[in-house]
Structure formats: structure tokens, C-alpha cells
Amino acid sequence: MELRTPLTQEVINKLKINDQITITGKIYAGRDAALPKLMKLYKKQELEKNGIYLEGGVIFHTAVSDAGIGPTSSNKLEIEESIPLLSKAGIKIHLGKGKLTDETVRALKEEGAIFAVTPPVSALLTAKMRHKKVAAFPEEGIEALYELIIEDFPAIVAIAHGESIFDRK
Amino acid sequence: MLQLHMENQFLTESEEDEMENLQVDVIIDRVADTLVKASSTFASDQIRAYERAIARETNENAKWVLEKLIENSQIAEERSAPLCDDTGTPHVIIELGENAILPGYFLNAVEQGVAEGLRRLPARAMGVLGNEKERISQEKGLSEDPGYLAMAPVRIIRVTGDKIKVHVLMLGGGPELRGKTLRVFHKHNFDVVLDEMVAWAKEAVALLGCQPAILAFGVGRTNFEASALAVEALKDANFDEQSEIEKSITEKVSAEHIGALGLGGESSVLATFVKIGMQRASGWRVVSLRTECCVGPRKAFCEF
């Protein structure tokens, strides 16, 4: 299925685990350093003041450097901890890799968001990136929050509506 | 073969300096190109291994991942771009021919070549600034220069011939998290050690996140030696050649059906490479496991 951001709840409701998707449009990129800071901005209701709009959005768990972009493990403490709150803030797809906990599976369901995975294919993913700019926290360098424009980003739905692809066995 | 500089009674001192500078420039350039090639290219035997994995894969999502990995390698090679954005820490192994002459400036030139290669790629700028304590806490941040990431200590191996071969391996961070070096009590039975190696690998591959894994084992007398042998196994890795021990480990771990990207299927491990060194009289062996991710082992060499 071809998806374009911002995403509606109706589109998310149609997706199920094992679906192969592509994502086109504006997304955010952040990981261990940026996501806790992003949560603080949300709690202080300062997202819009900083030009950040998460409703219907996608967050890709990656650093952004001259070497390109590629998924980091989403089950790292500070990244996985961000998923419930950022889903509440409006994020519809968390994009990364790795198995997440049952608690996160439940939180995604409750907030109407999903988790998708993409392989560490940096040359391919970087070739599909049309634009990048720092959206917040420039002091974090390659781990700042970035705004990316992407085209036909490939991914697989791994967790949706209480089901996880990693629980297949 | 590059004729490395030796003192020549027919050259003036300035001519000797000029020749040495020229040779240093050639070494830097070739090592830099080698680092870029290691970071951006799958060897033909690795592509064949992926094609075999795709042919036997029954899980459609896992097959999709394996196909993306080949597509990624094609784009990376075309653009001389990194296969993975974790461009890794450079490790250099030098194979020194018994009749070769290694001038004193060679290692310095290799070091400069590695730094130049990191800038040329460009690698992710990951070198941590500061003094000993600050480098641990990372409180002074990172250097913006990709070349600031110094290479790991060089290993030199004696070989026959009169050439000097410089191998560059780019070792990523994920496999470091999943690596392990520890003594194993063998009970005078090879299978006891093998079973332990398989158990370690099953646990590490499940946690890796970037499957299929490429497993490298070194078995030696010390932690240092075992780790060095594991990296040497990657240097010599040929996906078309698998020993019975290597095949056995690959099959046993793949039977877990962790699969590509953890999505299930037949491709938990693409191949295993084992290097068993000399042993000492004792009831234990030191085993080192490196769980390479699906873009590893990023390696290439140049020869002088």
C-alpha cells in the first residue's frame, strides 16, 4: 500500500501486520538523544511554538549524517519509551527495527498508531530522501530531530492493532 | 607492485625526500580507496550467498528484506555510498610478506589513508572529543571530522612472498553490542565447545535486529587472541566456502527461524566463519563471537 503523510486514522485502521507499504511525504527523524527532548516539548505544550506538528506524522528512528540514514534498534530504552507518548501526540507510524515489548504493543493499539520496520539499507533509503533539515535540538548533531522529505520509503507493518509480527512462533 | 622507498646511494637527500613523499601519497590514496570500497561494496561471493538465501526463503517478508539488501548493495556500489549509515570503526590487518620491506613511514601513511578514506566516503562523524573521562561520558560531544575516528590497533600477520597486503575492515556498532568473549570449559570434548558457541549465537542473533547475521568465531588462548582470530575469520571470509563446523553452526542457529530482520523464515544466519588458533594445556578455551549484521563483513584490501 502506498501511504502519503499526513496520515489519517482511517488509513491506519486499514493496515495490518505483514503489509508491505511505502511512505511518501514529510516525516521526522530522531533517536535516543532527540526523542526524550521531543516528549518534554509535548508535555510543555511547546511543539507548535517550535514549528513541530506531529498529527498524522511518522517518526523514523535514525541518525541523519552525511553517511546517510538507516534504522536504529527501536527497542533501545529512550526510543521505545517515547512511543506511547508520541503516539498520543499524534504520531501514526513509528519506523525502525527490532522487537518491541508487549506493553508497547498495547500502547500503540490504545493510541491508534502502528510500528513498521525497514532493513538497514542506507544507500537505498538515502537515495529516496529528497530533502533534510534540522527541526529541533541542533546541539545533538547527527542525533538532532530532523525533518525529511522522502519518496516511496519501503517498510513492513510489524505491530498493529494489538498484533505483533514478532509473536508469530 | 609499488616499489617502497629504501635508502639509495645514487639519490640526493632532497630527491629521497621527494620519492618518499610520492610513495606516502600513493599509500594514502590506495588505502583511502580501499576503505571506501569496503564500506560500499558486497563481494561477488556475498551476493551469491544472498541469491541462494532468496531462492530457499519461504517467508515472503523475509524474501523482501533479502531482495532489498541486494538492491541496497547495487545502489551503494554505483554511488560509492555507505551500505549502512553506521559506517563502523576501521580495523586494519597487514599481511607482511617474508621478503617484503616495510619502511618506517608505512604505518603512518596507512593511518593517514584511513582518515582520508573516512572523509572521502564520507563516514558518519563519530569520533568522541575530550580527555579520558570526557570521552566516556561523551560530554564534549563529537568531532565534525569523519577522519577523527582513529583506526583500531593494527595487526600484522607474516605471510610468504614479497608483498604487503593492507586489509581494511569496517566494524559496525550493533555487532559490538551482541559480541562476547569468554572462557569455555571444554571437558575434553569438541562438541561441548561447539554447543556453547551455538547457544551464544542463538541468543545474539535473536537480539541483533539486522539479520541475517554473519557469525565470526575465534578460539584462542587469551581474550586478545580469540578476538583477533574472530576478526581474522572475517578478513578471510568467503561465502562460497563453508567448513563442516561452519555449516553446522549456521544450520543450528537458522533452525530458530528468527529470520531476516527478525520477521521469521529460513535466513537467520547467512554464513559462519570460524578460526581456531593454537591452544594451551588447560581445561578451557577462550571463545570470541562477533555477530556481524547483514551488511557485514565490510572489507577490502590493497597490495603494495
Image: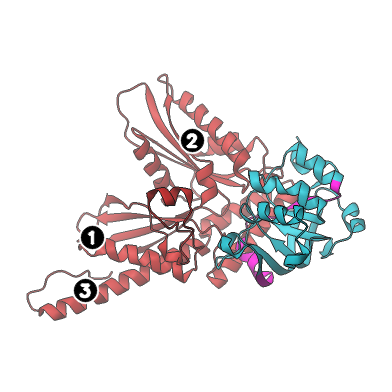
Residue A130 located within the stretch drawn in magenta: yes
Q: If the image is split into quadrants, where does the N terminus of chain B sit?
A: bottom left
Identified by mark 2, the residue type is Ile
Q: Nearer the viewer, residue B34 or B247?
A: B34
Chain letter for the residue marked with disc 1 in the picture: B
Which numbered disc covers residue B162? Answer: 1
Identified by mark 3, the residue type is Glu
Q: What residue sits right under mark 3 in the picture? A: B20
Q: Position of residue A25 (x, y in %)?
A: 78, 69
Q: What residue sits right under mark 2 in the picture? A: B245
- Left or right of A59: which side holds B13? left
Can the viewer see residue B303? no
Q: Residue furthest front?
A: A44
Crowd around label 1: few <14 · some 14–19 · many ≥20 (10 Å): some
Magenta range is A111-133
Colour chain A is painted in:
cyan
Residue B128 located within the stretch drawn in magenta: no
- Residues at marks 2 and 3 touching, judged by CB atoms closer than 8 Å: no
Q: Nearer the viewer, residue B287 or A159?
A: A159
Spatial CA span between label 1 and label 3:
19 Å
N-terminal-most mark, 1 or 2: 1
| SS label for mark 2 | helix
